[in-house]
Image: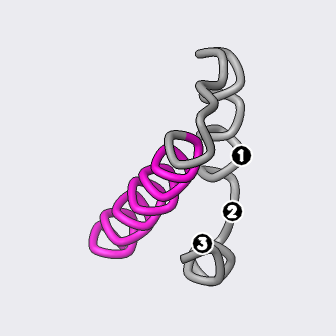
Amino acid sequence: MDGSMNEKENLVNQVFAKYRAYCMEIGISPAEMMQQAYLNHLKSLTTEELKAKL
């Protein structure tokens, strides 16, 4: 179970990094509150849903 939690955390970090890179690419910098909201949303997704976002 611990391994799957680490996998999910890793996926959350990867998807969030992709989001941040995309924001930089298009020249926007979302407010911290928006970033935290998206991060919380990612944490609520399943591993499969996170993989689909990569």
SS of the residue at dot 3? helix
Q: CA distance from mark 3 to mark 1?
A: 10 Å
- The quarter holding residue 23 reads top right
User: Residue 20 has which mark?
Assistant: none
Q: Give me the residue at 40% from left, 54% from top.
A: 13
Residue 49 part of the magenta segment: no
Residue 23 in the figure: left or right of residue 17 = right
Asked if residue 19 is positioned above or below residue 8 in the image, the reply reads: above
- The quarter holding residue 39 reads top right
Give the percent coordinates (x, y) of residue 27: 59, 35
Residue type marked 3: Leu
SS of the residue at dot 2? loop
Q: Nearer the viewer, residue 8 or 20?
A: 20
Give the percent coordinates (x, y) of residue 45: 69, 62
Residues at discs 1 and 2 in contact (Cβ within 8 Å): yes
Residue 2 part of the magenta segment: yes
Q: CA distance from mark 1 to mark 2?
A: 7 Å
Mark in front: 3 vs 2: 3
Count of marks placed on residues: 3
**Magenta residues, start to end:** 1-23
Residues at discs 3 and 2 in contact (Cβ within 8 Å): yes
Residue type marked 2: Leu
Residue type marked 1: His
Residue under numbered circle 1: 41
